[in-house]
Amino acid sequence: MAGRERLHFLFLNIGHFLDHLMMLVYATVAALALSREWSMGYAELVPYATPGFVAFGIFSLPAGWLADRWSRHGMMAVFFVGIGIASIATAFARTPFEIGLGLFMVGVLAAIYHPVGLAMVVQQYAKAGMAIGINGIWGNLGVGSAALLTGFFIDNGGWRMAFVVPGVVSILVGIVYTVLFRAEIRDPSHKKPLATAAPRPAQSRSQRDALIRLTAIVFFTTAVSSIIFQSTTFALPKVFDERLGGIAASATKVGWLAFLVFAVASMAQLLVGSLLDRIGPRPVFLGAASIQVVFFLAMPGLTDWAALLVAVAFMLGAFGQIPINDYMIGKMAKSELRASIYGLRYLVSFAVLASALPLIAWIHKTWGFDTLFYVLAGSAAVILAAAALLPAKLPEPDGAPATAPVPARA
């Protein structure tokens, strides 16, 4: 890949990192700072993140639609600058209502990344599995860094800095991105036709039925896996705060351990990306779901090192599963509609993310986290059953090119 294309891929990866980091700063702030500073229980604070995650889902669909009709590069510039401003504004919150409003605006701007950024990643690569895996690692490192950086700022300067510093960084990145890719913003590359290739024959009824079935599986597993992703990434700092008292006695140490778990688990996406290109999604999906069932069931009652090791194991399965649906959509969707379809996928995903927050708060307040892990094991078992229905080979969309498209210049 040419140097300019590699540079653009780096910006897309940085965007994924910042997207997940900023969406999860509040998870650690609520668990380790506001519960003490504002004298509110964890279960009382969690619902104020809900508007942000609702926006994260709802606004992904119009973001993808705008990107397909205006400019994907332009939308990425809006993302970087906009989410930075929203994050800084959230730092000035003085009441739970104000922080909820700030998190809502963060969610509105954060919604841009997944439908737009992933469409651009898939467009750039003929073999998308490894590219999605690498991009996913950056996103997961953002998840882990949210706990790490927020814990550090809580101990060294206050929780507000955890919103301000990433916000400033994002704005600076957005300015550089706009300058470097101003030509692409004015002349959207995704609207230019790809290298010509003979169209495929019209699909048979059985092929269309297979595509419909696969689409249903993709959106169903997307919804259920979102419960797992949200519950693990949002609640893990609080889980560690409660269960790792013997090895993590400060907010910084809790943040470090959460970061290490997320960082190690994110490496699973490299393996998954490679396997998707080599053997297809079905066996990979079955393996990732099986790992989650086993280790979610093993987690209740564990503390300290045992809890930490099991957390690494179930996060390997949870993070490893993330690229699979994105890979299948990338292979099935037509290029000119890809951002819109990713927008619909993330509308489903993040709508469930938002609904998972009250579930986390209710279960934690009523029964504790052991019950949550049993719920997650059941969710993973449902995903396992759905993955077993996947076909051995993905069907192609109507009118898909007979050969892999030549990667468009970023």
Image (tube, rainbow, N blue to C red):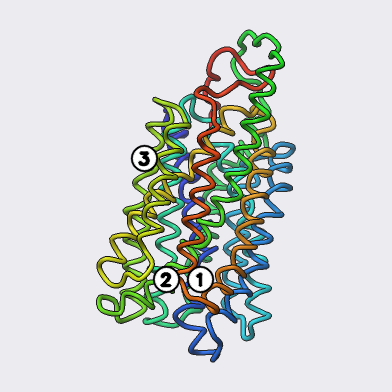
The residue to which callout 1 is attached is 27
Instruction: Determine contact: label 1, label 2, CB under 8 Å.
Output: yes
| Circle 1 SS class | helix
Cα distance in 3D space between marks 1 and 2? 8 Å
x, y (%) of residue 230? 53, 60
Name the side, left or right, on which 35 lies relative to 344. left
The residue to which callout 2 is attached is 237
Position of residue 85 relative to residue 378, above or below, is below
**Amino acid under disc 1:** Ala
**Amino acid under disc 2:** Pro
Name the side, left or right, on which 185 lies relative to 264. right
Front residue of 38/300: it is 300
x, y (%) of residue 367? 51, 76
**Amino acid under disc 3:** Leu
Question: Measuring 65% from the left and 22% from the top, which residue is drawn there?
Answer: 397
Q: Earlier in the sequence, mark 1 or mark 2?
A: 1
Quadrant location of the C terminus?
Answer: top right
The residue to which callout 3 is attached is 270
